[in-house]
Amino acid sequence: MNIQFVKPDITDNEIDAVAEVLRSGWITTGPVTKEFERELSDYLGTPRVACLNSQTIGAEFILRLLGVGEGDEVIMPAYTYTATCSVVYHVGATPVLIDNRIDSAEMDYDAMEAAITERTKVIMPVDIGGVVCDYERIFEAIERKRSLFTANEENKYQKAFGRILVVADTAHSLGASSGSVKSGNLADFSSFSFHAVKNLTTAEGGAVCWKNSPHINNDEAYKDIMLLSLHGQSKDALDKLHGSTWEYDITAPLYKANLTDIGSAIGLSQLKRYQPMLDRRHEIARKYNEAFSDLPVSWLNHYKEGQYSSVHLYLLRLNGKNEAERNDFIEAMKAKGIACNVHYKPLPMFSAYIKRGFDIADFPNAFKYYENVVTLPLYNVLTDEEVDYVITSVRELLTI
């Protein structure tokens, strides 16, 4: 067999929806994107959703909206993809990396709380693999350290909230929930990814949202995000075409990060059948769990009590194995025609972050989790035959 690590679930529905947009004569940001935003908002239960061309730019725009910049600190896990951290550098702030909890992909919340200082403006947790973080613990820490927070008087959000803000990296967790509260409503602000490898895709794309709050004027926040995404232009192309005048203003020299109607057509089609797509992912994850239960392995727990995971990634830890042995396992799987991956190599192991003073020796739990973790293929168009072949191959390699 030849089993890819990931494969997007594209049906005739998506193809027909894109063809309809192409035939419409309007392919950039327009009515389909606005409909996608409304449907996403209804699905998430958030007051508004703003679609953009990536989760990365969405997270950056939230930081800019909140006035985060030079002299400020943003706390986040060291165990994440670079996108989480790079946006902090983009706005001129300083990232503060936190080690994992022992034998966990989540950051150490006690260490997170201890890292809060007078300079901390944002905590940026990451819902790795589709499992939501302990947001209750995060907000408790923020409340205990509330006296340390000093708002930037020029930023309306910092002044209104009067505390550290939680800006979640929810790239993996569309559809996940804690209790009855869906991802997108657990943090103050959230940013989703619709990249080609995500559960729901627009090929490239993302979205930001925020939960209901008396401190946020929903229309103003949405308008501010749109200005950031379209060069600070007061009218988008559709408004200029259908408005009473072509005239527009440039309110500031801003950025270009809009999502097109072509991508939104794909996303809308996927959203209409998203729950069955999630159901299939759960079916595969449960099958893996059952098949590996007698092996010397552990896995990311997608079935925490009171939670519902979006099951974006299946992280399998090869207990007792080191980094070299883990890599040998991945090569052996490749020889069997199965592509695997690793999520994640901790940020302090990359040259970009080593140059900025980070040392993996300061993050022993993150390294320990990384050194024996393998990400197995998990996507809803995997056939039962392919799932069985992955299981058989893992068992053969780990019972030799």
Image (cartoon, rainbow, N blue to C red):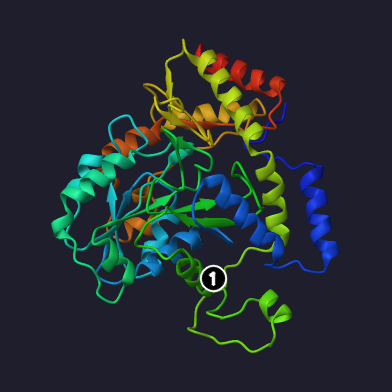
Residue sitting nearer the eye, 146 or 108: 146
- Report the amino acid beneath label 1: Met
For this orientation, the residue located farthest to the right is 23
Query: Is 89 displayed left or right of 195 in the figure?
Result: left
- The residue closer to the viewer here, 246 or 323, is 246
Residue 377, picture quadrant: top right
Residue 35 appears in view: yes
Q: Position of residue 329 (x, y in %)?
A: 52, 26
Counting every numbered tag in the picture gives 1
At a point 59% along the width and 62% down the height, the residue shown is: 53
Quadrant of the drawing holding the N terminus: top right
Q: Secondary structure at mark 1?
A: helix
Q: Is residue 231 left or right of residue 322?
A: right
**Left or right of residue 39, residue 15 in this image:** right
Residue 362 visible to an observer of this rendering: no
Question: Residue 179: x percent and y percent?
Answer: 41, 33
Measured along the vertical axis of the image, is residue 138 above or below residue 166? above
Give the residue at mark 1: 226
- Residue sitting nearer the eye, 168 or 5: 168
Q: Position of residue 54 (x, y in %)?
A: 55, 59
Crowd around label 1: few <14 · some 14–19 · many ≥20 (10 Å): many
Rendering coords of residue 378 (x, y %)? 59, 31
Residue at position x 54%, y 37% in the image: 312
Q: Nearer the viewer, residue 196 or 355?
A: 196
